[in-house]
Amino acid sequence: MLMTQVLADCYACETSIEDADALMAAAMAAARAVGATIVGESTVRYVPHGLTIAVFLAESHIVLTTWPEHRLLLIDTLLCNPDMDADKAIDAIVARLCPAGEVVRSRVPRRIADAPNQA
């Protein structure tokens, strides 16, 4: 099976990237936008600033990490259901947190297969 992990570097984001509730709401909206099943969540606040929000999905994850001093948001989206569009999830987050900023996306192919037999 082949999956694609989609990473997005979002520049010139809103100050709301400093708000853990706003980040979580954006990640949850992204999961709902693709029809993913949310199974857990976690928030980490860094000192002096910055956050990581993780939403754990039955289909894998959506993770947001911020550098508010640079108005930067990094998004990591991995969806193992081929009918779900990671770009749609990213678009939902960007619309809430970085609507006027630049977004650079990268795609990482992930192959899920049994390990070859070692002789």
Image: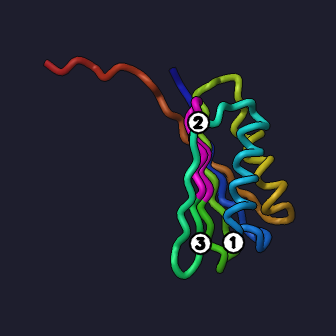
User: Circle 1 sits in a helix, a strand or a loop, which is it?
Assistant: helix
Query: At 35% from the left edge and 19% from the top edge, which residue is drawn?
Result: 114
Query: At 78% from the left edge and 55% from the top edge, which residue is drawn?
Result: 94
**For this rendering, which residue is in front, 101 or 63?**
63
Earlier in the chain: of badge 3 and badge 2, it is: 2
**CA distance for labels 3 and 2:** 24 Å
When the figure is inspected, residue 108 is found, relative to residue 103, above or below; the finding is above
Asked whether 24 falls inside the magenta stretch, the response is: no
Residue 39 badge: 2
Range covered by the magenta-colored residues: 53-64
Q: In this view, does 49 lie to the left or right of 27?
A: left
Tell me how the rendering is colored: rainbow
Identify the amino acid type marked 1.
Glu
Q: Position of residue 25 (x, y in %)?
A: 75, 53
User: Circle 2 sits in a helix, a strand or a loop, which is it?
Assistant: strand
Residue 50 badge: 3
Q: Position of residue 12 (x, y in %)?
A: 76, 71
User: Circle 3 sits in a helix, a strand or a loop, which is it?
Assistant: loop
Label 1, on which residue? 18
Identify the amino acid type marked 3.
Gly
**Quadrant of the image for the C terminus?**
top left
Q: Are marks 3 and 2 in contact (CB under 8 Å)?
A: no
User: Which numbered mark, 2 or 1, is in the foreground of this view?
Assistant: 2
Residue 77 occupies quadrant = top right
Majority SS type along the magenta span? strand
Earlier in the chain: of badge 1 and badge 3, it is: 1
Query: At 31% from the left edge and 23% from the top edge, which residue is drawn?
Result: 115
- Disc tally is 3
Q: Position of residue 26 (x, y in %)?
A: 75, 52
